[in-house]
Amino acid sequence: MQLRAQALVCAVRAHGETAAIARLLTAEHGLVASYVAGGRGRNLRPVLIPGNVVDAELRARSDAQLPFARLELVASRGPWLNEPLPAAAIGWACALIASALPERQPYPALHAALNALLDAVCHAPSARGWLPGMIAFEGLVLRELGYGAVPRPDGNAEWSVQLAGFDALGPLIERYALAERRGGVMGARTMLRERLARIS
């Protein structure tokens, strides 16, 4: 296995003293877990932030082996992690993808949608600008995984209506997309919902 592609960092887990296991979403190869030597070091720690766009070079001797990754930062979403609401939105969207998608199956629509959603979260003046996109993204995850279509949100609807639409999707995601991994992953969504509730 040898490939090079732009990818979105979706999850990072410490491995050993200095390395990390990163789950990267690519358009053509889907979600790929990879070993990043020195991933917890000073140089790579700012690169391995969920939501970041990286140029990834992955190599493995066989398809069954965890590939080694060399990563270069393309775009950082780190600055927005200092803001509680954008940080919660980025964390939830990336955790959903990292937990719900099977390994190495391409979902180009989800790759494009996640990238667009993260851009919206980082650049919209408030959550009112990106919550319809979050709802549409969650609906797309369900549809791409084969659980049927959900109504598209109305971006011009009242805030309370948008929140109700967000709430309605939660049980579907928990029951279907995250059937085997509810706990900590849904906790990220709960945190996001609590922060959204503070907007009047």
Image: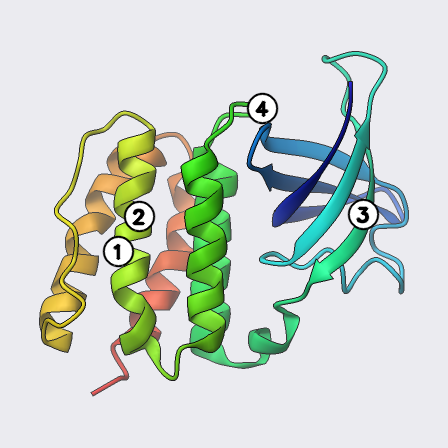
Residue visible at 16% across and 51% down in the picture: 152
Task: Estimate the x, y position of residue 75 in percent, counting from the top left.
Answer: 67, 63
**On screen, residue 171 above or below 50:** above
Residue type at mark 4? Arg
Crowd tier of the residue under label 1, counting other residues whose Cα lies within 10 Å: few below 14, some 14–19, many 20 or above: many
Within the image, what quadrant is residue 177 found in? top left
Dot label at residue 173: none
CA gap, disc 2 and disc 4: 20 Å
Say which residue label 1 marks.
135
Residue visible at 89% across and 58% down in the picture: 41
Say which residue label 4 marks.
104
CA gap, disc 3 and disc 1: 31 Å
CA gap, disc 4 and disc 3: 18 Å
Task: Estimate the x, y position of residue 193 in percent, counting from the top left.
Answer: 30, 67
Residue type at mark 1? Ile
Callout 3: helix, strand or loop?
A: strand
Residue type at mark 3? Leu
Callout 2: helix, strand or loop?
A: helix
